[in-house]
Image: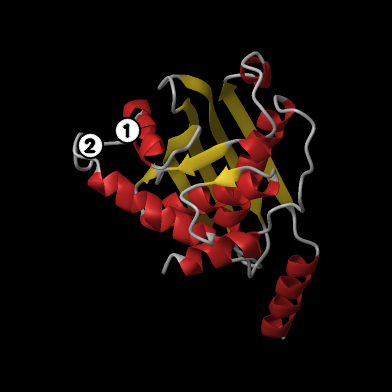
Amino acid sequence: MLRPVRCLWATALVLVCSLAWGIEREGSSWTDLQKLKPPPPSEISVIVLPFWAKGQTQSEMVRGAVLLNLRRHGFKVVPDSGTLSGAARATDKLVDQDRLREPGARPDRQLAARVGKAASAAWAIYGEVEELRTDVSHGFFADRKTGTIDARLVLVSVETGDIIYWTRVKGTWGSKVYARKAGSIERKMAQDAVAAVFEDIGKALPAHEVGPEVSQDDIQKYIQDMGL
């Protein structure tokens, strides 16, 4: 009789899941960017370099969330390749063609400015994903999965090579959902963290239309389009 009872409890835990999401941010304020009087996002072309990370999937989860939020706020993503994954691949080629880049080195503002200039971008974004992982602790009725994110995003003016906005996001996300997969937790963290950053950036911009929120499915589709 013990076994069926355990299964029933596990099912109940899926339905009445307990979630906790704590996030901390440091870095620039939207008022710093506002002082530069940026034009509407529809007039700003932006290139997004690959994020440095321990794994390519983690890198693309965050870059995908950034690209999707750029599109949500109406920015012009370059190189214009028809799709966000196409823009990412075209950007990777520009990075690989940069003769001053040190192989294996983390991206920096100088690289971002050079690649941005090659793509005729006004802004360039780069960063690092120090942590984006899920840890699992096994319980009798359900596993507890705890996600961790630690990522930095840097926005560079291509014209001047200066950093005009930066932020570091750190947080944990806990779930008692029995069947929730680690990948979905990591997409959730990337989705929420990047959305919070763009909510801040959006305050510095002139009034503009904002599209529907980026979903985990949107990020997953981007990752699949990148062949991961």
Residue at 30 percent across and 36 percent down: it is 106
Residue at 67 percent across and 40 percent down: it is 42
Q: Badge 1, how many Cα within 10 Å: few under 14, some, many 20+? A: many
Gap in Å between the C-alphas at discs 2 and 1?
7 Å
- Determine whether 196 is above or below 219 in the image: above
- Measured from the top left, where is residue 128 in percent x and y? 41, 38
Amino acid at circle 1: Leu
Q: Which residue is mark 2?
A: 101
Work out which quarter of the rendered image holds the C terminus and state it.
bottom left
Identify the image quadrant of residue 220.
bottom right
Residue at 48 percent across and 25 percent down: it is 157
In front here: 22 or 139? Answer: 22
**Nearer-N-terminus badge (2/1):** 2
**Can residue 224 be seen by looking at this rendering?**
yes
- Measured from the top left, where is residue 187 in percent x and y? 58, 56
In front here: 101 or 213? Answer: 101
Amino acid at circle 2: Arg
- Measured from the top left, where is residue 122 in percent x and y? 50, 32
- Determine whether 39 is above or below 189 in the image: above
In the image, which disc is placed on residue 111?
Answer: 1
**Can residue 138 be seen by looking at this rendering?**
no
**Labels 2 & 1 near each other (Cβ < 8 A):** yes
Q: Badge 2, how many Cα within 10 Å: few under 14, some, many 20+? A: some
In front here: 158 or 155? Answer: 158
